[in-house]
Image (cartoon, rainbow, N blue to C red):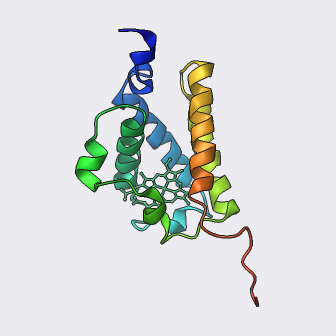
Amino acid sequence: MSDEEISVYDEVGGMPFFQGIAARFYEGIRTDAVLLPLYPDGEDLDGATHRLALFLAQYWGGPHTYNEERGQPMLRARHMPYRISELERDHWLLHMLTAVSEADISDETRGKFVDYFVKAAEHLRNDQPLRLVNP
Ligand code: HEM
């Protein structure tokens, strides 16, 4: 197998890596006064952690368990119920990039995750930076 054929999923050590990233991310969410109120199950973040880990593992070349459990990701549609302005996007990124910065991976791979998350978070933004009170 040539280097090109090794997925990021395999390179970082498979599912435990993505479970670790998701767990670290939600540790941050737990104390985030902007984002925590958005989560439908309140402080029970186990389900959300599981879904995020499976989605990321699948995206980076791992098993398709996310699709089996949840169907097509359609993440923009799934995030429409939550107002995501620049504020929410940046809080989300803070926790995710903290998890990525602490991970034991090469700088090249870290760069791939940073690029992806910055773009993905902006893609899911669905509101303007500020909402006018009296438009
Ligand atoms: C930009 C700011 C974001 C906010 C405020 C946000 C917020 C949320 C909330 C409140 C949920 C529902 C929690 C649950 O599943 O119980 C959710 C679900 C989810 N989010 Fe995000 N999210 C953001 C960005 C992202 C990004 C960039 C990704 C992926 C790279 C992502 C991946 C997911 C996944 C996979 C789910 C579960 C979807 C499902 O199967 O129902 N989110 N998000």
Side of 56 where 33 appears, left or right: right
Q: Which residue lies at the image location 41% right of the left edge and 23% below the top edge?
A: 7
Q: Which of 71 and 50 is in front in this view?
A: 71
One can see residue 9 in this view: yes
Side of 99 where 66 appears, left or right: left
In the figure, residue 64 lies in which quadrant?
top left
User: In the image as oriented, which residue stretches furthest toward the left?
Assistant: 68
User: In the image as oriented, which residue stretches furthest toward the bottom?
Assistant: 134
As drawn, 61 above or below 44? above
- The percent coordinates of residue 23 (x first, y second) are 45, 42
- The percent coordinates of residue 90 (x first, y second) are 67, 53
In the figure, residue 63 lies in which quadrant?
top left
Total label count? 0
- The percent coordinates of residue 111 (x first, y second) are 62, 28
Side of 74 where 97 appears, left or right: right
In the figure, residue 117 lies in which quadrant?
top right
Q: Check the picture and name the quadrant holding the C terminus.
A: bottom right
Q: Which residue lies at the image location 45% right of the left edge and 42% below the top edge?
A: 22
- The percent coordinates of residue 29 (x first, y second) are 54, 53
Side of 130 where 120 appears, left or right: left
Q: Which residue lies at the image location 53% right of the left edge and 62% below the top edge?
A: 36
Q: Which residue lies at the image location 54% right of the left edge and 21% below the top edge?
A: 105
One can see residue 95 in this view: no
Q: Check the picture and name the quadrant holding the N terminus.
A: top left
